[in-house]
Image: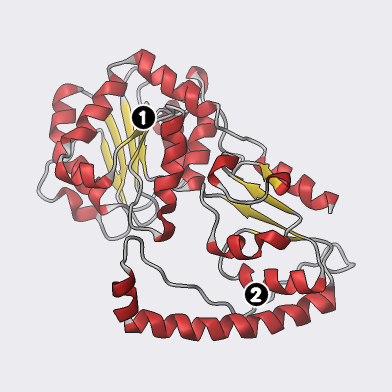
Amino acid sequence: MNNNKNIDYIFRVHAGKLRRYHKQSWVERFLDYKTNLLNTRDLLFVGIGFFESVYLLSRYRPNAILLKGGYVGLPIGFAASLLRIPFITHDSDAKASLTNSLVGRWGIYNMTGSNPIFYKYKGHKLIRVGVPVSDKYSFVDQKSRDNFRNILKVPVESKMIFITGGSLGANEINKAFVSIYKKILDRYRGIYIVHQVGSGKLNVYGDTDIDDHTRVSEFIDGMYQYSAAADIVITRASATSLAELAIQGKPIIVIPNPNLTGGHQLINSQEILNNNAGIIIQEAQLIKDPSTLFNAIISVLDNKNLSNELSDNISKLAVSDAAMQIAKVLLKL
């Protein structure tokens, strides 16, 4: 946004989000006075942010704008369309964000992370580019898997499970895994387990004796190493996590969060299900019967053919150069 290519600017504009809760009825929404007041306030913020965006975009006249779908992009998108400044949208999730749904009609292109069938954008503007991920993620073959195990001091001949519910953890996944933990140890002697439980959740194992080969952590640095070393990864269905694991070609068990606005993770997991690229367990099913998780784990660990099939199928969904594709489209503008 400046002729001096060595200078970057960061500006703040007002913005507001529409608070919606998945599966909340219209009656519940109407009676939720606190949320309605916050939404009304944030609508005013969007108006303020629009005029701030008009001023900033008029002053700096960027050649192109990338909107990633967050609510801060709404006033910017409206301002860019008014000023006829070209912009593109990108959705990592398999469902377009509310912001991109509202401003996407004026975008030059609508780029997506998943199959175009999940989106309602006009076909001639829709481009699937995948989800940008760190370049630390790459396809994991037997040799690279063993290299990562050597780094983590995990024997190459041992079985290994990696469980992650994201930075905040996932209570239902944590509780379900703890309930089957002893059964897994009994079935697989010497198995290595790495469980990222999330902030403040280290007590999830309670009085359970934790095996010497089990690591329980709130946070994990270098998660790509653990997912690469594992035989199977148990994960939520965030778009970025699925993209990272697809690039690595890892067999996965996916437990989507059913409570997020718009059911984004439920839709993200649908592409995995449609392509037989992982095992999907719904959270309600997990709560009702945690043994479904145990059965899914042993079905992969005990069946090399299934493990290879899941790995091959998820690899077909991978896009390793998503960031480069986005950059190329921006440069065309």
Q: Is residue 261 above or below residue 294?
A: below
Q: Is residue 169 above or below residue 43?
A: above
The image quadrant where one finds the N terminus is bottom right
The residue lying toward the viewer, choosing from 97 and 68, is 97
The image quadrant where one finds the C terminus is bottom right
Q: Is residue 117 above or below residue 261?
A: above
Q: Position of residue 277 (x, y in %)?
A: 44, 28
Quarter where residue 51 is shown: bottom right
Instruction: Give residue 96's mark.
Output: none
Q: Residue at x 26, y 29 (%)?
A: 296
Quarter where residue 211 is shown: top left
Q: Label 1, label 2: how many angstroms apart (C-alpha)?
A: 42 Å
Q: Please report whichever mark, 1 or 2, sits nearer to the chain's N-terminal start.
A: 2
Q: Residue at x 61, y 35 (%)?
A: 319
Q: Residue at x 19, y 54 (%)?
A: 203
Q: Residue at x 69, y 72 (%)?
A: 78
Q: Residue furthest right?
A: 3
Residue placed under numbered mark 2 in the picture: 75
Q: Position of residue 233 (x, y in %)?
A: 37, 34
Q: Is residue 222 visible?
A: no
Q: Are marks 1 and 2 in contact (CB under 8 Å)?
A: no
Residue placed under numbered mark 1 in the picture: 232
In terms of secondary structure, where does tag 1 sit? strand
Is residue 19 left or right of 283 when viewed as pictured? right
